[in-house]
Amino acid sequence: MVTILMAVYNGGSYLKEQLESIRRQTYTKWKLIVRDDGSSDNPEEVLSEFAASTDNEVTVFINNPPEGSAKKNFARLIKDASSSQYIMFCDQDDIWKDDKIEISIKAMKKLEAKYGSNMPLLVHGDLEVADQDMNIISGSMFALSHINRHPSLAELVIQNNVTGCTMLINQPLCKGVTSIAGMEDVIMHDYIIALYARVFGKTAFINKPLLSYRQHGSNSVGAKDNNSPKYLLKRLKDGREAYKEAMLLSYKQTALFAKIYRKTLYNRNMYNEYKFLSQYGALHKKGYLYRIQFYFRNGVWKKGFFRKIMQCIWG
């Protein structure tokens, strides 16, 4: 059984299309848990109609008081699903491919056959990027944003490659991140899940789009062409302070990860991993030359020539 977690906030104009794409799934052994974070556009009517029209289990919670962010809402959903065998994550405004769950489950079963079901396992994939009317902008977000499909740990700590709405995780991975997912220094739930899977488990990438990712003005996160002149000019205009702020978030998230999982890392004799994570997490306390040397020494680089240049310039 796959438990689908959907975080909802003022997405009523797109919600029905997303729900219908879940209904059309070729893999039918799923249930849906929804948490509405205080929407003002009354999504309960759409959700109630959907629940009444499907034989699958649909549970809707209203956060009172609201959590105030998608990260915290998904963190609460992760706790709701901690006893589930498999967990998927669903945005309110995308459209899933009809075979999204089926393809993901097949990839998960291959991982289980190789590593066992007690290993924390993560499956994720590519996605189409569309505008608010679902006109396709790019057939691959990984190609558009120049994302590394198979990053090392050193590359992952500085640049996430996992998009939450494409993920399928198993119960050991879900339980592993339940306590940390909503913490202040976590950037986003999918990022901390990706880190946990990279350090303690195994990951598989599906090299095809699993859904159409709708970009519009209300998106919490958007897909960008990170090598486009427009994007690069904006980054240069935003300048060093914006870059430093983004890097600080990365350092603090990694420092938190090392702190929370220090005992687990030591119990598994993962001393080198702990050393790397704790040192990277403390880079904001070091000088420019130390940081640059650390990047070179450990291969900590963002993907893309221009992003590496900015990393060298601003440290």
Image: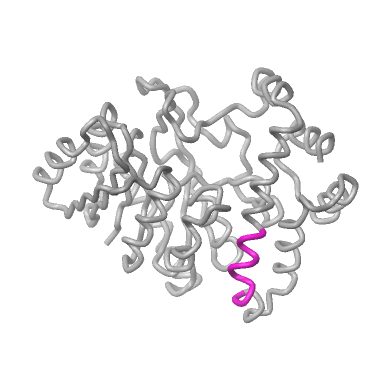
- Tell me: residue 179, above or below residue 88: below
Which residue is depicted at the point 19% across and 51% down?
Answer: 58
Which residue appears farthest toward the right when viewing the image?
289
In percent of width and height, residue 200 lies at 57, 68
Along the horizontal axis of the image, is 272 left or right of 132? right
In percent of width and height, residue 266 lies at 66, 78
When asked about the image quadrant of residue 47, the answer is: top left
- Tell me: residue 52, above or below residue 120: above
Q: Which colour scheme is used?
A: one colour
Query: Which secondary structure type mostly characterizes the magenta part of the structure?
Result: helix
- Tell me: residue 134, above or below residue 56: above
Given residues 12 and 163, the one toward you in this image is: 12
Which residue is depicted at the point 47% across and 65% down?
Answer: 179
Given residues 145 and 113, the one toward you in this image is: 145
Which residue is depicted at the point 44% across and 23% down?
Answer: 217
Q: Is residue 252 magenta?
A: no
Given residues 100 and 43, the one toward you in this image is: 43
- Tell me: residue 244, above or below residue 131: below
Along the horizontal axis of the image, is 37 left or right of 254? left
Which residue appears farthest toward the left when viewing the image?
52
Given residues 76 and 271, the one toward you in this image is: 76
Q: Which region of the structure is painted magenta?
A: 255-264
In percent of width and height, residue 180 lies at 50, 61
Q: In which quarter of the image is the N terminus?
A: bottom left
Q: Quadrant of the C terminus?
A: top right
In percent of width and height, residue 28 lies at 22, 52
Which residue is depicted at the point 78% across and 38% down?
Answer: 311
